[in-house]
Amino acid sequence: MEQDLDWGRSPTPPGWYTPALQDPPKDPKPFKLPPRTKPTKEELLEQHWDLLQILKAMDPIYTRICQKIPAYNRNLGYTRLQEAVRKTLRAKDLLEEVFTGHRNYGDAYLEWQLYLGSCIHGVKIYSASHLDQCLQCGIEASRINQLYQEDWKPSSKVNT
């Protein structure tokens, strides 16, 4: 079979035209993305206000699950305001998971501490393995987990 192969012949039939190989572009134009528009400070303030209103409409237990949520402050600089919006958005997403039943209160509490990088007691948290270093956080997580279990207990009345 190897004797039938002609290694000097082109693999494409002679009538085929391959423009990409035979006619390369004379002046290649690089692809450019459109410029990214940054939100204005007013837009960030409005977004932060809206997120805080969504949080306030939730169950009040959210203040025990997600502590240190940045408060609304018109005097923040642009970078700090972006950080406040990012934290508030993360808190909203985490609390939505909690209140839809996808996560319990204690796990959400510990994940929020991990997101912040330190707990409210001053212990630095660099990874999930550091979450057990603060005894007070473990106690608080178990306390709010008891509230979670009370909220999700099936009712003792059975409809017949």
Image: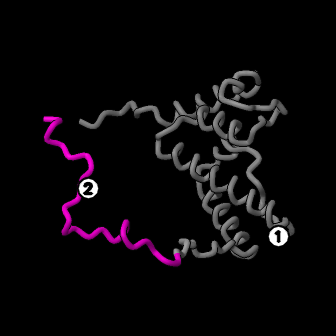
Residues rendered magenta in the picture: 1-27
Decide whether residue 103 is among the magenta residues: no
Q: Where is residue 113 in the image (x, y as percent from the top left)?
A: 71, 37
Residue 74's disc number: 1
At label 2, the amino acid type is Ser
Residue linked to disc 2: 10
| Residues packed near mark 1 inside 10 Å, few (<14), some (14 to 19) or many (20 plus) | few
Residue type at numbered disc 1: Arg
Report if residue 17 lies within the magenta region: yes
Quadrant of the rendering where the C terminus is positioned:
top left
Residue at 74 percent across and 62 percent down: it is: 82
Q: Disc 2 vs disc 1: Cβ atoms closer than 8 Å?
A: no
State the scheme by which the image is colored. Answer: one colour
Residue shown at the point (63%, 32%) measured from the top left? 144
To which quarter of the image does residue 24 belong?
A: bottom left
Quadrant in the rendering for residue 33: bottom right
Mark 2 Cα-neighbour bin, 10 Å: few <14, some 14–19, many ≥20: few
